[in-house]
């Protein structure tokens, strides 16, 4: 995609501010962490099932990641991973096994020791069978061998890239206590709401509609941590109330863009309040236009490219996201340099090119100035997906496509797009989770049954794309695998089966006395063991 | 009739009529004053009102002309609330007349039905209907009418009950006129005045319900409505309060105008009835 140099400079500048704030805070953190204090944060939803091993979603992780830990966490340093319950891991050359060395001297919150049996149980009975994302990544997991209490060897039926397993560790591998779950109905286990884990905080209480309370785990394996005595999640569904609470210092953190983007410039000037744009790279959302390829006009690549040409990404980012987003070129965000390639023929903004392609495809403007009509379903997930729907309608009218906006609530939208295929265009917001194979390639792969949400329900089937996805899934060598994914990006960049418009993530608003904020790429959904409150 | 008009021409009646006429004029002239698509992104986003002569009332978050949205919104609001009031009155009048004139089991059945509708708050009923049927002009009109038809039906039934034993009704019966013809052609016109004053309340209520539905995102997303404008402006209420305030004032003015007209009409008609028993 072509971008003006001023645009690039602007973005670099806007992100630099957040980065600088976070770096200066690392500086204070050195050796100066204060023990104690209760951190109060805003929560906007109360998931019914809090078990992160079953429901790998940010709403669940926000609370549960402090209590139940994964094998490893994402990191800004080194190879991108920091050890948690596993201290080392290595994949076999044939891709059929991965060996984990587990941390010793770890105990569950109820006092029982943590062993490799817990990992084996979680992997085989929970991640592989019940977890929304694990069902894809661990589908070929055959057995987990536990030669001793601190070693777990994952055996796969088919070669599975160790790189994929490694990239899946932060989000997909929350370890559950076997002694509480074995032999029970895992989905209905009371420990799904009263969590028991190995993490730095113990789950104490949930009062529906009011708060969650977590307290310090004095027996945490990382001696001296956590720094906080307790974390309280105050349920505050109204964005206005969240902004007021943080201004009044009643809460110290509003994560997941709980403060509306339009309010950030104002609240950032309030003394004692900082706006943090870092700490969400590991959960990058993508604003996309989903296309129903069953529609004859949209099955034509020229029409899809014309639609992509009609979208002014600069306008979308400056006006809808108020600068808190980046233009997207394809299915892999630029943040993930291991897989990303800029060498993609993404159509840039040009209404002239759009009109030319539509004319070439044989859809000339009719008497009313319109070429054809479409139904456009903006996802109701974010304010920005709804607003982009309004924008897209206008952008399409400018090139002679009459789009009618159809609004639904979340269940209605999911049913219309992913089960009934009752749409022409939809605005979506898929999440990129650290590896294209976790939740990205499934948007392109053909032959999936109807009703699987956030997957290819678009009627798109391209033999070359399917072949590339299959090839990457069986490629053990990391560098080679990345190369296959670069070819994949080139192919879908040309075909535009889904149009990627922007990459966005969340913004945190925090009090400046909260330290060690945003020090890993999925900070809000990490364990906060090193987070502390200055007096 | 002239006496009724004279009594109507009080301060409130005139003010209401003038304000309402302005709103109607705005709706009629929307395409002349602000030609083109009111949802087009015409300029820089968030231009303050009265700062750029091309956008006298400023622009919203996506750079749409607020004046154009307001004028076209007037049109949408009047069409929806007018249609809703019309449907409400037609349904209410038909049911009220049938129940009042025919009586017996039909009366019981229709009035229990009205009880059932009245026992659910009007807005909840509208909300439920639009969430199921999906937002469109027809569904919003139906949703508003669903909760409102009972009021004219009950008022009319009471009027008809007091008229159906009068001598002129018996006279028509003796002449051999079919009962439904008597009911709708001869009795109904005599029972209408109180319902006409009720019409103003129905229109005002329809405007409010429609605005509330669009505020909650259940209006027709392809046309501009005042409720949707207020909702859009809510995200930036601390930095650009005019985005919510301008359509808010428009709703207030319109509802006030309709209510003033309704009050004046009520007094005018009521006075006549007291004078001529």
Image (cartoon, coloured by chain):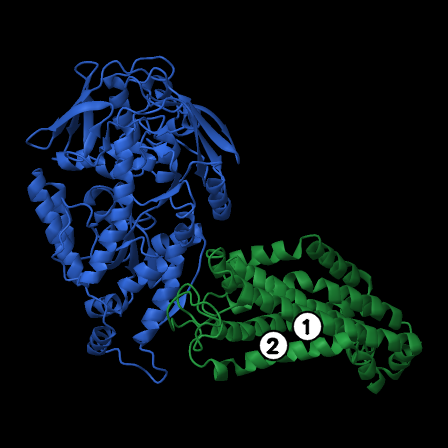
Chain colours: A blue, B green
- Where's residue B239, x and y in %? 46, 57
- Where's residue A521, x and y in %? 26, 39
Q: Label 2's element?
A: helix
Q: Nearer the viewer, residue A159 or B203?
A: B203
Would residue A473 be found to the left or right of residue A291 on screen? left
Q: Report crowding for label 2: few under 14, some 14 to 19, many 20 or more residues within 10 A (C-alpha).
A: many
Q: Is residue A461 visible?
A: yes
Would residue A482 be found to the left or right of residue A35 on screen? left
**Quadrant in the picture for the C terminus of chain B:** bottom right
Spatial CA span between label 2 and label 1? 9 Å
Residue at the front extreme of this rendering: A271
Residue at position x 69%, y 72% from top?
Answer: B258
Q: Is residue A56 above or below residue B169?
A: above
Q: Nearer the viewer, residue A471 or A334?
A: A334
- Where's residue A288, x and y in %? 29, 57
Q: Nearer the viewer, residue A116 or A287?
A: A287
Q: Label 1's element?
A: helix
Q: Which residue is mark 1?
A: B257
Would residue A471 be found to the left or right of residue A69 on screen? left
Q: Is residue B191 visible?
A: no
**Quadrant in the picture for the N terminus of chain B:** bottom right
Is there CB contact under 8 Å for labels 2 and 1? yes
Chain bearing mark 2: B
Q: Which residue is mark 2?
A: B23
Q: Tell me which label, 2 or 1, sits earlier in the chain.
A: 2
Q: Quadrant of residue A148?
A: top left
Residue at the bottom extreme of this rendering: B2
């Amino acid at each position: 995609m072509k971008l003006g140099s001023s645009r690039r400079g602007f973005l670099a500048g806007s992100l630099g501010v957040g980065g600088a704030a976070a770096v200066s805070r690392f500086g204070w953190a050195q050796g100066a962490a204060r023990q104690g204090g209760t951190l109060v944060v805003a929560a906007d939803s109360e998931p019914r099932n809090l078990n992160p091993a079953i429901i790998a979603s940010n709403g669940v992780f926000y609370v549960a990641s402090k209590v139940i830990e994964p094998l490893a966490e994402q990191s800004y340093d080194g190879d991108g991973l920091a050890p948690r319950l596993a201290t080392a891991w290595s994949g076999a050359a044939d891709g059929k096994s991965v060996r984990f060395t587990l941390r010793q001297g770890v105990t569950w919150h109820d006092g029982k020791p943590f062993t490799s049996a817990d990992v084996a149980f979680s992997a085989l009975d929970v991640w592989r069978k019940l977890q929304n994302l694990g069902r894809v990544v661990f589908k070929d997991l055959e057995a987990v061998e536990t030669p001793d209490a601190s070693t777990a060897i994952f055996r796969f039926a088919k070669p599975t890239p160790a790189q994929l397993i490694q990239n899946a560790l932060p989000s997909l591998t929350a370890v559950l206590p076997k002694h509480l779950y074995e032999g029970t109905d895992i989905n209905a286990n009371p420990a799904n709401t009263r969590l028991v884990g190995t993490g730095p905080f113990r789950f104490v209480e949930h009062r529906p509609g009011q708060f969650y309370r977590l307290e310090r785990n004095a027996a945490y394996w990382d001696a001296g941590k956590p720094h906080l005595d307790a974390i309280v999640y105050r349920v505050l569904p109204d964005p206005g109330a969240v902004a007021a609470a943080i201004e009044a210092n009643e809460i110290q953190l509003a994560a997941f863009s709980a403060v509306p983007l339009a309010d950030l410039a104002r609240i950032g000037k309030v003394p004692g309040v900082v706006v943090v744009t870092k700490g969400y790279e590991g959960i990058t959302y993508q604003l996309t236009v989903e296309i129903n390829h069953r529609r004859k006009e949209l099955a034509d690549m020229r029409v899809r490219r014309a639609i992509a040409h009609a979208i002014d990404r600069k306008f979308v980012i400056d006006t809808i996201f108020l600068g808190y987003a980046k233009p997207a070129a394809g299915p892999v965000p630029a943040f993930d340099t291991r897989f990303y390639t800029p060498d993609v023929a993404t159509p840039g903004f040009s209404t002239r090119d759009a009109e030319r392609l539509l004319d070439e495809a044989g859809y000339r403007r009719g008497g009313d100035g319109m070429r054809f009509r479409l139904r456009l379903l903006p996802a109701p997930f974010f304010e920005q997906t709804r607003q982009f729907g309004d924008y897209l309608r206008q952008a399409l009218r400018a090139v002679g496509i009459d789009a009618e906006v159809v609004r639904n609530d979340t269940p209605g939208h999911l049913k219309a797009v992913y089960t009934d295929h009752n749409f022409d265009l939809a605005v979506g917001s898929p999440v990129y989770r650290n590896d294209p194979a976790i939740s990205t390639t499934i948007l392109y792969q053909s032959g999936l049954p109807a009703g699987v949400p956030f997957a290819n329900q678009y009627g798109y089937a391209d033999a070359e794309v399917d072949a590339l996805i299959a090839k990457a899934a069986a490629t053990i060598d990391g560098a080679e695998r990345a190369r296959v994914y670069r070819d994949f990006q080139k192919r879908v960049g040309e075909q535009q089966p889904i149009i990627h418009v922007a990459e966005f993530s969340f913004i945190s608003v925090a009090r400046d006395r909260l330290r060690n904020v945003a020090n890993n790429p999925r900070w809000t959904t990490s364990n906060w063991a090193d987070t502390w409150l200055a007096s | 009739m002239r006496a009724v008009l004279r009594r109507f021409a009080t301060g409130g009646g005139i003010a209401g009529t003038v304000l309402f006429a302005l709103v109607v004029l705005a709706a009629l002239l929307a395409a002349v004053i602000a030609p083109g698509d009111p949802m087009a992104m015409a300029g820089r986003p968030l231009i303050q009102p009265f700062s750029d002569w091309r956008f006298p009332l400023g622009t919203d978050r996506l750079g749409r002309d607020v004046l154009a949205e307001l004028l076209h919104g007037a049109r949408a609001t009047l069409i929806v609330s007018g249609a809703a009031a019309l449907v409400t009155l037609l349904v209410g009048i038909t049911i009220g007349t049938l129940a009042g004139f025919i009586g017996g089991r039909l009366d019981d059945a229709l009035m229990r039905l009205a009880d059932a509708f009245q026992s659910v708050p009007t807005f909840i009923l509208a909300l439920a209907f639009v969430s199921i049927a999906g937002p469109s002009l027809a569904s919003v009109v139906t949703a508003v009418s669903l909760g409102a038809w009972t009021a004219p039906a009950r008022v009319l039934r009471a009027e008809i009950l007091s008229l159906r034993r009068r001598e002129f009704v018996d006279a028509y019966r003796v002449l051999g006129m079919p009962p439904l013809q008597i009911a709708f052609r001869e009795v109904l016109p005599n029972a209408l005045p109180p319902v006409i004053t009720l019409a103003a309340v129905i229109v005002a209520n329809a405007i409010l319900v429609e605005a509330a539905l669009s505020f909650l995102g259940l209006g027709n997303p392809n046309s501009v409505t005042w409720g949707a404008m207020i909702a859009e402006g809510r995200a930036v209420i601390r930095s650009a309060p005019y985005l919510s305030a301008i359509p808010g004032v428009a709703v207030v003015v319109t509802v006030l105008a309709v209510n003033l007209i309704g009050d004046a009409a009520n007094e005018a008609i009521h006075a006549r009835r007291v004078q001529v028993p």
